[in-house]
Amino acid sequence: AWQQVRGMATEKQLKERMVGTKNIEKITKSMKMVSAAKLRGDQNRLAAAIPFAKWTSPITGPEVDLETLDVSNFPAKNLFVVMTTDKGLCGGVNTILTRMTRAAVSKLDADGKKVDLFILGEKGRAQMRRTHGDRYIGSATDRLMPYTFELATALTQEVLNGEYDAVHLLYNKFKSAIVYIPSVKSVTPLLDPASPFLFNFAVEPDNDPETLQNFYEYTLATKVYHSLLDNATSEQSSRMSAMENASKNAGEMLGKLNLQYNRARQARITTELIEIISGASALKG
């Protein structure tokens, strides 16, 4: 039977590969610089959003690590708002989050609790569609960046179309330029005037349900806004690291190709010299 035999690459082929690899290296270096500039902007916006959202912490409690999430105290009806990116080339920032989301959904299923999904970002929607597409209640893609509180408010209105006992925001919490942590923020409705948390507040009109509903919506919108900025900053830091690694790999590949090219060139020159010497010897003989 005929078999394809892979031969040595010619000098021309190696030269073409070197040119292509060099162009890729230039692109990845440029993307790294762009991501670094965007990261600084996102870090500044996140720093401004932290005090803006600080007042919600006593209401919702601190975020928890998604990987070790304990769902035993979750209510019967839950909604996961999964925050991913619209663009790729950002390392494992989406893959890790969606994998942990699947694990959390499995935990809730094992406990006999209902969970639906609202996906933010094209990458997350594509990754989760095959296995959990039947749980989608909505999605939002092609969002304009940088994110604004207006966007967070619009997303909150979409999220609150359903009746859920709790809304859980799944996102990547930014820690540093090289570290982000998949995390969860849970927000439950504060619609009961007898709630101990509301004892320190005066609700006007007296225990008005609409006022409490508005308070819940504003709390959720604030949490969504803060989580969006956290995730956006994590996205840029991950993309910057991914492009740095890609540039490093392209540089290493370029070095190997250059070595192969020099060897092929040296072999050709040696062969030509041997042919010349052999021809000259034959003429003398």
Image (tube, grey):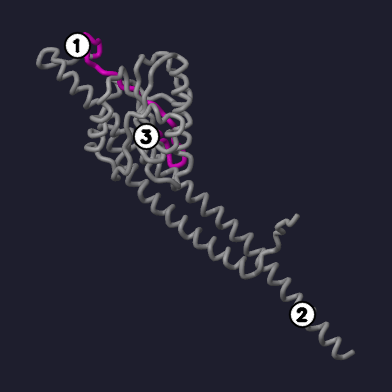
Q: Disc 3 or 1, which lies upstream in sequence?
A: 3
Q: Depth check: 91 or 38 in front? A: 91
Q: Residues within 10 Å of mark 2 (few under 14, many from 20)?
A: few
Residue 133 horizontal/vertical position (percent): 40, 31
Residue found at x 47% / y 60%:
26
Residue 79 horizontal/vertical position (percent): 34, 24
Q: Amino acid at mark 2?
A: Leu
Q: Find residue 83 and name its label.
A: 3
Residue found at x 52% / y 49%:
245
Q: Which residue is mark 1?
A: 193
Q: Which residue is mark 2?
A: 273
Using the numbered discs, state the Cα–Cα distance from disc 2 to disc 1 in whole angstroms.
95 Å
In the image, which residues are magenta? 172-197
Quadrant holding the C terminus: bottom right
Q: Amino acid at mark 1?
A: Pro
Q: Residues within 10 Å of mark 3 (few under 14, many from 20)?
A: many
Q: Is residue 103 above or below residue 249?
A: above
Q: Disc 2 or 1, which lies upstream in sequence?
A: 1
Quadrant holding the N terminus: bottom right
Q: Amino acid at mark 3?
A: Met
Residue 15 horizontal/vertical position (percent): 59, 68
Using the numbered discs, state the Cα–Cα distance from disc 3 to disc 2 in whole angstroms.
64 Å
Q: How many marks?
A: 3
Callouts 3 and 2 close, C-beta under 8 Å: no
